Image (spheres, rainbow, N blue to C red):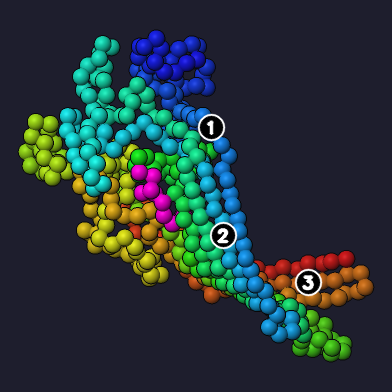
Amino acid sequence: MVYGPVGGGTPTFTGIAPPAQHSGSGAQATGNISGWDPSNPQTSGFTAIVFPDRFRDPDVENWFIGLQRELLARLTVEINYVGTAGRNLFRAENVNRIPGGRLPEGTCVTDNFGRRLCSQIDTNTAANGLEINPLGLLNANYGSLRVWENTARSIYHGLQVSVQKNVARGLQFAGNYTYSHSIDDGSSWQSGPTSANGPAAGDGVTTDQTQPVLDRGNSVFDIRHRVTFNYVWEIPFYRNSPGARVALLGGWQWNGIWSLQSGAHWSPFDLRGSRLVPGDPNACSASTFDPVNCLNLGGDYNLDGENNDRPSAISNHIHTTHAQWANGFNLPGNFFYAPCLGCVGNLGRNTFIGPGYWVLDTSLLKNLRVSEKFRLQFRVEAFNVFNHTNFLLGENNINSPSFGIAGGTHPPRNFQLGLKMSY
């Protein structure tokens, strides 16, 4: 089976197509190397994969320096700097697009980088009766071309501070604080509109394939601050008491884990396609084209055929409060706006900060020796003991009615009892 121009003619599928190819017949099997099965759960539809020459494995570099000091007997403090860099990371990029390609036929604009962008649309009819390039693609002979590239990079810097108290008089504890920053241009929550999903190696669609620096920013898992504290206390009361008192009141152990962290980073998207409408009569027609009054009311701001663009905004950083996530943070109606025609928005990647998180899990244990052979342990455990509401990130599509509202919550307070026999 072969896809592509055959003998200089129209690119078409040749050979006997196996059923699993899902290439169909007729127009959908002509000029399309993407043979996509619409029932495939990988809903992005990018299934035409190209592996270029000199494709290589990614490189990962790690470095570390640390200092450990015993302050008091059994009490130590440790300070570490940890760094990690990823180079030549995979990106599955749809390369068959070009900024400005879907401008009105025969028109050009200057974008906010000073580049001259011109429409690639050609509605003239070819010998086969079809329009030459109705979608303004970089190469109209093909559909989506997802090329695996070694173009993504990542960098992580972390300051880690820990204090640890070893067991003394039945008490031990440890506290840890991490300040870190992770930057990359390839991590994603793997949503269909903005990536090629998990099997396709991270982000599948950049904002502008000719300007990869536009997508270099905070990683989606970038958590700047994280604090944990844990303890185990063998409660000393009645430990050495005789008879029934030690059986009832002694042998208790109290454990706990505190976890607190700042929110993850995320990006708002405008996931509508391009929709050019005239602000003045004929502003979007080639003969009277006016880029100021030819308005793009869709989300494909740079008009390259991918509706995954971030809009412009009056502020590049939003860090909303817990109460705002509870009630919806209600940005003003003019907060997001469309950039100039063919331009990209001014909003950086993952500059919004999601809801923070804190929780206390604790347990109380009673150990009881029944005989030389049998022991019982009774457990009372509580998760999120203060029943603090920890929100999940919500919808990132600015046109969704749910935008600005938490997408749910982490589990509420939960108690459980347990009894274990050991022998």
Label 1 environment density (alpha carbons within 10 Å; few <14, some 14–19, many ≥20): few
Residue 320 placement (x, y as % from top left): 37, 67
Q: Quadrant of the C terminus?
A: bottom right
Q: Earlier in the sequence, mark 1 or mark 3?
A: 1
Q: What number is the disc on residue 385?
A: none
On the rendered structure, is 185 left or right of 214?
A: right
Three-letter code for the amino acid on which mark 2 is drawn = Gly
Q: Residue at x 50, y 71 (%)?
A: 388
How far is disc 1 from disc 2 in space, using C-alphas? 28 Å
Write down the quadrant of residue 125 in the picture.
top left
Q: With 93 as the anchor, is 79 left or right in this view?
A: right
| Type of amino acid under label 3 | Gln
Q: How many marks?
A: 3
The residue tagged 3 is 377
Q: Earlier in the sequence, mark 1 or mark 2?
A: 1
Residue extent of the magenta highlight: 211-221
Q: State the residue position of label 2.
A: 83
What whole-number distance in Å separates the C-alpha atoms at marks 1 and 3?
60 Å
Q: Is residue 120 above or below residue 307?
A: above
> Any mark on residue 54, and which?
1
Residues marked 3 and 2 touching at CB (< 8 Å): no
Question: Which residue is pictured at 52% across the width and 44% down the height?
Answer: 89
Name the residue at 32% across, 41% down: 307
Query: Does 217 lie within the magenta span?
Result: yes
Give the image location of residue 111, x and y in percent: 23, 44
Amino acid under label 1? Answer: Arg
Front in this rendered view, residue 348 or 210: 210
